[in-house]
Structure formats: structure tokens, C-alpha cells
Image: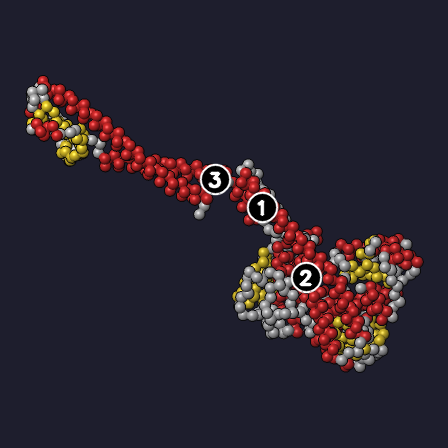
Amino acid sequence: MKLRNYTLLYLSVSLLIILGIWATLFYINMLDEVYDSIDDGLDNYKMLIIDKAETDSTVVHKNAFAESNYSIRAISREQALQTRDVYRDTLMYMQYEADFEPVRLLTTAFITSEGQPYELKVISSMVEEDDLIEDLLYALLWLYLVIMVTMAIVNTLMIRRIWAPFYETIRQLRNFKLGSRHHFVSPRTKVSEFVALNETIELLLQQNLETYNGQKQFIENAAHELQTPLAISINKLELFAENASLPDAEMEQLGSVLANLERLTKLNKSLLLLSKIGNKQFEAAEQPINLNEIVLRIVSDFEDFANHRLIRIEVDDIETIRPRMAPDLAEMLVVNLLKNALVHNREGGTIHVRMAQNTLEISNTGVPEALDTDKIFTRFYKNAQSSQTTGLGLAIVKAIADACYLRIDYAFEEKHVFSVYF
Amino acid sequence: MRDNICASLAKEGFRVEVAENFDAAMDKVLLYDYDCILLDIMLPDGSGLDILQLLKKEGKSDSVIILSAKDSLDDKITGLDLGADDYLTKPFHMAELNSRLKSVIRRRSFGGKNEIRLNNLTIFPEEHSVQIAGETIDLNRKEFDILNYLVANKNRLVNRGSMAEHVWGDNIDSADNFDFIYSQIKNLRKKLRDNNADIEIRSIYGIGYKLLV
């Protein structure tokens, strides 16, 4: 739910409760005041009638309400003495409304100067409570609506204005990527909470960047430092294998040690290459290249390797792709894609290379199931069977694609299809 | 690393002298003439490129192979522009160094017009052709490269990976194993045998090959 809607939800609920309570209290108070005023009017009327009864004898004979709003009937003295002023609500048929309407009725008793006791009833028309409640309710509903609409408008405008730096922060964070050239630039704002937020984010990113660079540096240094001892070990072992006349079994063991050391060297080289790509060390060498030439050359380099595995490489050289990129990177991209297609192929399989419409597509036979798209481009992801690979080939491909702003896709359509869009 | 190179080159019968730093190297190259100088760019107290520059200024004709840990195109271009004969990126196989060294020295000494004789085998490196007892035999490019590489390292153990890189190019080191070399070796052996060549390519199980003369 959006921030705006949250605010509105809370406001509407609390406003509803406050208005409800307020309306009830207001209604009770107002009704009280109305009764008070009506009762005062009845009292006044009573006095006037009693006074008039002294002088006008017709008054005391008026024993029905009819056109006026009082009635008088004679009662016994005892009754008169017991009677106290009583105000009560009752219903009376109103010709105008053609219905029973509530009236206020004052029942009292008086004794004329002649000593005759009478009972006097005075009525006054009353507010119709149901109508009052209805009117009040409508008024309140309108008020509620108007307030809510105003709130919604003000809120939207306010959020758009005040929260603008916040949304900018989110946008920046969304575009931020460790190791990319995008820097986080905190938007200008006077809101202290946002300032604090931006400062915190900057600090966090700074720390992350430092850690990231530190790790990158570490991998680079480690790979670099490993290079020389590895080379020396390999050279020394080769010299040893040459000088010592060892039996075949031991020679084979030595060979296996050498092979492993060489794999380590390869891994090292790949790591160094990855950090070089990450450090944008190839940007200076960018130039227009003919990708098709590179692909054809590399395919021919790998031909013997493929033949040995009984893998057929078919090349569809339809259109020339001329991207602008470092030739070394283009070569590494193609080598690693092709190597991937070879190594993860099956004996007697095929590789199909297609170059058209600025797309390099390399598809190969292999395990008959799709690979995990999220993982294949990550470092050291490999399936269990291929212990001979470094697990860095596709990571290098991805790194090169990222560095050169190329899109790369993997799909499984009976074959594994890798497409690079230039 | 230096010790390894010295040991390997001594085995080839070269006389090797070592300079451990910039100053020692300067003294040596100015005092003596060498067939070939293996020049590391990164010296503890200076740049190998400066030595190269000085050599050329002094009009020395020693061959120079640059050895560099930096796989950077700039260094390579600068080095070759300054007059170096070849450029090797560390780490490298000793067999590769042998091959390059011999090729450089040969080019210098005989102006490229030369031949290598091994028993009844004669190799013409510039023409990419091979004769056995005077008869030219037909080798494809890879077979020739393999033979040439083995000849440069005759009687030495040549690692399969090193041979693959030399013959099939740097990219092939991405291959997960080098078994595919075997079929080319097999063809080469057959051609040598059919023509009664007086040399033998021996497989060293698990490691590589050795050319026995």
C-alpha cells in the first residue's frame, strides 16, 4: 500500500470516530437546550392563561386543544393540591402533517380567585428528533466527505513535494550497482529525516564500496602473487621429470601433479582477467572490430579439439557483426562461449554458431535439460560432472558483456542456446 | 624463476650469465656482446625498457627477448618498437622459451636463411618444409609446428599444454585436456616412420613428448 493511502486510511478512520463522538455530544447538548427553551415557553404560556382565566370565563371552559394549544378542565380540590407541574413528551395528531407528531405537554393545576380548582394542559410543538438526527447525519456526512477529499488532495500534493527527495533516493539506489561507475548522489533536501537517511545510505555504500574494492584488490593480488610460485613449481617439476628416469606409474603421478598445477594457473589467469575486466582496463583498446573474423579464427583453433571429441561445429556466417570493443575482450568472449559449448557437449554432438542481425548465437547439444538461468553466469557454478573446468568461463562472458554493455541470453530449446546481442 | 631459466638453458648447452638488477644488467650489456638477452621489464631498481633503449643507442646488435609479467599490449608494442626481437608473457613454459630463443638466434646469425639438421632430417623453418634424406615430405601446418617445436627442444621433455599453446594458439589453454594433440602426433609419427626418419617422438606418459635424436 502506498504511503499516501496509508495516511488517508488512518485519517479517515480517526476522523470518523472523532466526528461520531462529537455529533453525539452536540446532539445531546442541543436537544437539552431546545427542551429548556420550550419548557420556559410553556411556563410563560401557563402564567398568561391563568391570568386570563381570572378575567375571561370562556377560558376555563375550553376543554379541548382544538385550534389553541391549551385545555382546561375542572378537578377536585384534592386533585389540584396533589398536582405538580409535569413536563412530558407525547404524541398528538397534527392536521398539517397528517400524522402524530411529538409535542411537549405541561400538566399543571391552578385555583382561581373564586376558589375553583382546574387542571391546565399546555402544549408546544417540538423538534422532530428523527428529522433532526437525519439532518445532522447528512450534514456530518457531507462534512466528512469534504474533509476527506481535501485531505486526499493536500496529501497527494504534499507527498509529491515533500517526499520528492525520498523518491529520488530510491531511484538512485535502484540504479546503484557495486563496481559500476554509477555513483550515489544524494538529492538536496531540507527535511532532516531525509538528510539523515541519505547520510546513512552514503556511509553504508561507502563501506560497501571499500569492502568490495578491498576484496577485488585481494583477489587480484592473490592471483598475481600465486602466478610466480606456480610457474616456478611447474618449471621445476618439468625439469625433474626430465632428469629423473622414473617408472611409468610414477611419471603418470607427476603428470597429474603437473596437470593440476596447470589448471590452477588457468584458474589464476581467469581470475586476473575477471579483475582486469572489472577494473575497465580494456576500455582504452576499444575499436571497431570484425567479430566474424574472430569467430572463424577461434573456431578453426578449436577444430582439432572438437574433432577429437567427435563434435561437429557448424558456422552460419550470414551477416558481419562490427561492434566497437577491445579485440582482446571480443576474443575472450568468443573463446569462452565456444569452450563452454565444447566442454559441456556430448560425444558426437554439434555446435551451431550463427552470426546475423548483430547477434552471435552459439547453440550446443548437451545434457537434455535447461540450466539454472540465475546461476550459470555466476562464478564457480558448475555441474558435478565437469571437475575439469574452472567454472569461470561463463562468468568471464558475463563480465565482458557487462563491461561492453551487451545483452546476453540463455535459452534451452532442446539445445543450449547462448545469444549475445551487439 | 631465474634459476629455472638458467638450469633449463644450461641443459640446452647455452652459456648463461645472470644480472640480478638494473645496474648489474647495464654493466654486463655494455661490456660484453651476447647472442641473446632475456630482459625482464620489471627490475628491482629500474625498467628493462631503459636498458633496451640504451642498447639500441649504443648500436649493439644483441638479440633481445622481453620477459614481462604484465600481459599488457602497450608494453608489448613499446618493447617491439624499441627493437626487441620477441616478447614473452610470464608465466611461460621453458620449452616455449627455448623455441623462441633458438628462432631469434637463428634469424640473427643466418639472416633467416638456414636449416636445421637432425640425423637424416632437415628442417627449413622459413619455408615451413621438411626433408628426410633429401626427400621433401608433406606435413600440414600443425604437424610442421609440432615437429619444429620438438626439434627446438630435442631430447627434452615437452609438456603437452606447452605444445598445445605453441601450435594451437593461446586460446587453446581453455581446453579442459590436451588429448586431442595425440591424433596429430600420431599422423606425424606415421609420416616420419614411413619416410624412415632417424628420429623418434616418444610419449612420456601423463606429461608429454620427447624427441629422441
The three-letter amino acid code for the residue at tag 3 is Ile
- In the structure shown, which secondary structural element does the residue marked by tag 2 occupy? helix
Residue B189 visible in the snapshot: no
- Examine the image and state in which quarter residue A394 appears: bottom right
- In the structure shown, which secondary structural element does the residue marked by tag 3 occupy? helix
Residue at the location (53% across, 66% down)?
A370
Which chain letter matches label 2? A
**Distance between mark 1 and mark 2 Cα atoms:** 34 Å
Instruction: Please state which of the two labelled residues, at mark 1 or mark 2, is closer to the viewer.
Output: 1
Q: Nearer the viewer, residue A192 or A309?
A: A192
Q: Between disc 2 and disc 3, whose residue precedes?
A: 3
Which chain letter matches label 3? A
The C terminus of chain A lies in quadrant: bottom right
- Have a look at marks 1 and 3 and say if they share a chain: yes
Residue at the location (85% across, 74% down)?
B117
Q: How is the image coloured?
A: secondary structure
Percent from the top left, x then y, of residue B111? 87, 64
The three-letter amino acid code for the residue at tag 1 is Ile
Q: Between disc 1 and disc 3, whose residue precedes?
A: 3
Image side of residue A230 versus residue A349, left or right: right
Percent from the top left, x then y, of residue B102? 84, 67
The three-letter amino acid code for the residue at tag 2 is Ser
Q: Nearer the viewer, residue B147 or A318?
A: B147
Q: Name the residue tied to disc 3.
A: A159
- In the structure shown, which secondary structural element does the residue marked by tag 1 occupy? helix
Q: Residues within 10 Å of mark 3 (few under 14, many from 20)?
A: some
Q: Name the residue tied to disc 2.
A: A270
Q: Nearer the viewer, residue A28 or A181?
A: A28
Percent from the top left, x then y, of residue A347? 61, 74
Q: Which mark is residue A201?
A: 1
